[in-house]
Image (spheres, helix red, strand yellow):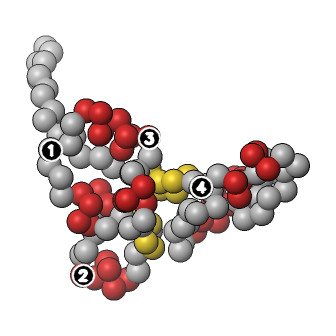
Amino acid sequence: GTVTDASENNDDHTNASEMDIFAETLPEETIQSVKIADSEDLLKAVYTLEDVVLPLPGSETLFPGNEVAGIYHEIANKDGISLTESIHGVKEFSITSMKGGYRRVLQRPIDCEWIFFHTI
């Protein structure tokens, strides 16, 4: 799958505005550390589930090296969209004019408070 560098997740003091950024897309410096994990990475347990990201299609997006990439292309093709070429007459609407981005699959809650209600 596609992952971010494990060192990017060690900030235990993320404030609310930073969490809003994470909820939308990853910051530029984190995007530069995205890579496709291989079997060696998995054996070394370099990454956790919190490091896994899903791509937002664009010209600079790395798609996973597994069947997930095929699913992205299949869904886009059903709508007549190519994720690799510019086929739209207006450049701004073509997939190649958008950089793309990534969203985390899972974000660990920080400073979360909860109350348990017992019902009879």
- Residue 22, image quadrant: top left
Question: What residue sits right under mark 3 in the picture?
Answer: 24
Q: CA distance from mark 3 to mark 2?
A: 30 Å
Figure quadrant of the C terminus: top left
Looking at the image, is 34 positioned above or below residue 90? below
Residue ID at (20%, 42%): 14
Q: Reading the chain from its start, which is encountered first: label 2 or label 4?
A: 2
For the point 77% across and 63% down, which residue is it?
A: 85
Please tell me whether mark 1 sits on a helix, a strand or a loop. loop
Q: Are marks 1 and 3 in contact (CB under 8 Å)?
A: no
Q: Tag 3 or tag 1, which sits nearer the N-term?
A: 1
Residue under label 1, please give it: 13
* Residue corresponding to mark 4: 99
Mark 3 is surrounded, within 10 Å at the Cα level, by few (under 14), some (14 to 19) or many (20 or more) other residues, namely: few
Q: Secondary structure at mark 2?
A: helix
Residue on which disc 2 sits: 44
Using residue 10 as the reference point, say whether residue 88 is left or right of it. right
